[in-house]
Amino acid sequence: MPNAEHRHCVRHLHNNFKLAGHTGAAFKQRLWAAARATTIPVFEAEMEQMLGQSQAAYKWLQERPAAHWSRSHFSTVPKCDILLNNLCEYFNAAILEARDKPIVTLLERIRTYLMLRMARLRETVWPHEVGPRIFGIVEKNSIESGHCIASYAGGGKYQVNSMLGAMFVVDLERHTCTCRKWDLSGIPCPHALASIAKSEHSPLDFVHALYKRPAYDRAYEGYISPMPSQAYWRKTGHVPIKPPVYRIQPGRPKLSRNREADEIPKGATKLKRYGIVITCRNCGQEGHNFAGCPQLRQGQPRGRARCGRRGRGAVRGRGARGKGAATANGDVDTTSVNASGTTASGTTTVRGVKRGRGVVSEQQQTQARPKFNVKRGAQAPYVIRKTNVFADSQASQSSQAPSGPAPRSQAPSGPAPSKQAPSQSVPHSQGPSQPAPRSQAPPQPAQSSQAHQGSSSQPQPMVTSPKRPRLKSPAKRIRPWRV
């Protein structure tokens, strides 16, 4: 196409500019300012500043025609003012997963990608007469037009005075402006929008027809036909072409391009949180968060009541607040305790200690420790089940003993008290000749009952083992108890 206009990417032009020895932020700013200039006087002013900085840099840019890299020399026919080849960068990013595949697979994936993309964009719905991106640019220029004052001269021409002292001429009939921004892109500039507002017209009516829906539909009216798999292709009978000899290069293949030294790194546009005071949710002091609280490092109790602990042994999930679960202060929940002071499993309720996901009393730990080897941090159902089995076996052995103290809540004969549990009460119709329940001990002589009367009237002290120190590092493996 001999009549097509050729333009250079300013980013690659700047890379060659640096290789020529013209490095630094000052040269970069002057180069981009000259490239973004839309009028020749502004371009010449920027080049004069470049000459004042370095004559060699000025000479290097003069050797490259400005019609290839500056907006001041671009043609107004294409209605495009892009200075970068982002279209090529976007295409390279789209074929990133397919470019290392064989030639047939590569072409098939690109065909499928383009087919789906054209079908998706063809069905896109616009809320306005122009596209969403173009509508955003018009809205932005409308805000900037508030700094301009338009005066009607006649023949569709306006004189626009800027707050900065500049003066422009806008022609609404020819869609031109002295700044040439409207001429290059086809989108009204702030000076043109001030004139359009003066004439009480819609800004979208002055956007070029290439940005409207009919032109968009013409661009995507075609489609790529789907194809069957390779197994359904017609056989030609020719000798199949063998793939070229491929030599695997050492190292891992690169999937991303090498960034320049002065290029903005990825994620550098996010601002850091300067001047924000951090407050700890544990102690309430400022200057640190929960993870760096000094009270937790020293092993002190937490300042605020929490529902459960994080990490290993946390009280969470199903059964965390069930029967016998721990409350905020570590006690056993009294909702599952009978009037006789025993839980549903028959064990005495004492101050609980958190073990794993539930609560196991110290008495249960003392009874289960010489019989079972239970790991610290095991689940509560497992520990309680083993403990109850051991408690039942101890109760059966004590009931079969020839002598022993009778339970305080049970009498050898006569009706049972009304406060006793229904499962252990004796009906009034039964006499002394009725056999005692299996869980009750046989009646003992009066001497033995009197001997043990003083000891049974007072609660016996519970023998507990010293608490094991809590490890500070949750990642350290905890060994099971040893007998």
Image: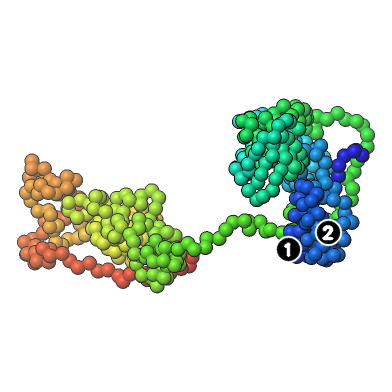
Where is residue 155? Give x, y as percent.
Answer: 73, 30
Q: Quadrant of residue 154?
A: top right
Say which of marks 2 and 1 sits in front: 1
The quarter in which the N terminus is drawn is top right
| Three-letter residue code for mark 2 | Asn
The one nearer the camera, 465 or 232, is 232
Query: Which of disc 1 and disc 2 is earlier in sequence?
Result: 2
Mark 2, secondary structure of its residue? helix
Q: Is residue 413 above or below residue 129?
A: below
Q: Quadrant of residue 14?
A: bottom right
- Disc 2: CA contacts within 10 A as few (<14), some (14-19) or many (>=20): few
The one nearer the camera, 441 or 284, is 284
Q: Is residue 443 visible?
A: yes
The quarter in which the C terminus is drawn is bottom left
Query: Distance from label 2 to label 1 (Cα)?
Result: 15 Å
What residue would you read off at disc 2? 16
The colour style of the image is rainbow
Q: Viewed as shown, does residue 215 lie left or right of 352?
A: right
Q: Is residue 210 visible?
A: no
| Three-letter residue code for mark 1 | Ala
Where is residue 157? Give x, y as percent.
Answer: 71, 34
- Disc 1: CA contacts within 10 A as few (<14), some (14-19) or many (>=20): few
What residue would you read off at disc 1? 25
Q: Residue at x 72, y 40 (%)?
A: 169
Q: Residue at x 19, y 68 (%)?
A: 461
The one nearer the camera, 482 or 216, is 216
Q: Residue at x 67, y 58 (%)?
A: 265
Where is residue 129? Give x, y as percent.
Answer: 65, 29
Q: Viewed as shown, does residue 401 lie left or right of 305?
A: left
Q: Residue at x 85, y 57 (%)?
A: 61
